[in-house]
Image (cartoon, rainbow, N blue to C red):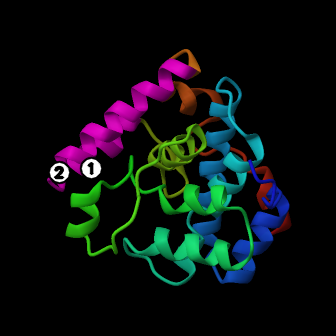
């Protein structure tokens, strides 16, 4: 893999310089804490997962709608970071968006499905965080079902169990490991 990936402290600086609100930065750091827990038992590129987790919502500095992932991927591409990181950010929404979802949501044609282990970890770590609170995957699945996004809910459920199998236990144990509101080591500079 390309190693043009920012370290964790650089990611926080990048979010701040991009104009992300503190709420977004705290959310990204919480996703980072969940991803870090997954990495303790799942073999993946640590630096890529952590940079992807911390930068996944950088596009919210411009747009808070569905376009934020695509916008964020373009921001990091323009900064010269690796295409692997660009892909992680672009594909982090839910458990991915298939062609039908992308079209229905007004996204341009493209690949929005997480395929690599790093893309999957970041997408699902984001699914396990609501604002700054670590939650069970059922909360996110039920939210999608209530919106009528049944295919998305099924993909999220499937992704949860795929990663849980790799982790060696149900990932819904993460709030018990790091707490619902984990200590976020990256925020000491804010």
Q: Residue at x 51, y 77 (%)?
A: 71
Q: Position of residue 41 (x, y in %)?
A: 67, 23
- Circle 1 — which element? helix
Question: Which residues make up the magenta segment?
Answer: 137-166
Q: Residue at x 80, y 72 (%)?
A: 13
- The residue closer to the viewer here, 178 or 88, is 88
Q: Please tell me whether residue 153 belongs to the stretch shown in magenta.
A: yes
Q: Are the residues flagged by discs 1 and 2 in contact, CB closer than 8 Å?
A: yes
- The residue closer to the viewer here, 183 or 158, is 158
Quadrant of the frame with the C terminus = bottom right
Q: Please tell me whether residue 140 belongs to the stretch shown in magenta.
A: yes
Relative to 65, residue 147 above or below: above
Asked if residue 85 lies left or right of residue 88, the reply is: right
Q: Position of residue 84 (x, y in %)?
A: 64, 55
The span from disc 1 to disc 2 (Cα, nearest Å) is: 5 Å
Relative to 32, residue 177 above or below: above
Residue at the spot of label 1: 143
Residue at the spot of label 2: 146
- The residue closer to the viewer here, 157 or 70, is 70
Q: Residue at x 67, y 44 (%)?
A: 33
- Circle 2 — which element? helix
């Amino acid at each position: 893999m390309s190693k043009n990936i920012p370290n964790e402290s650089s990611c926080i600086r990048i979010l701040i310089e991009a104009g992300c609100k503190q709420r977004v930065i705290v959310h990204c750091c919480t996703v980072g804490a969940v991803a870090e827990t997954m990495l303790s038992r799942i073999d993946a590129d640590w630096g890529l997962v952590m940079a992807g987790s911390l930068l996944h919502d950088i596009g919210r500095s411009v747009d808070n709608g569905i376009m934020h992932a695509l916008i964020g991927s373009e921001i990091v591409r323009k900064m010269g970071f690796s295409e692997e990181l660009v892909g992680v950010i672009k594909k982090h929404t839910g458990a991915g968006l298939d062609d039908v979802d992308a079209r229905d949501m007004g996204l341009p044609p493209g690949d929005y499905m997480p395929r690599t282990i790093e893309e999957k970890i970041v997408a699902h770590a984001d699914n396990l965080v609501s604002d700054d609170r670590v939650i069970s995957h059922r909360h996110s699945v039920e939210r999608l079902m209530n919106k009528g996004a049944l295919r998305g809910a099924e993909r999220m459920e499937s992704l949860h169990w795929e990663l849980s199998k790799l982790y060696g236990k149900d990932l819904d144990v993460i709030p018990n490991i790091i707490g619902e509101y984990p200590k976020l080591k990256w925020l000491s500079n804010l």
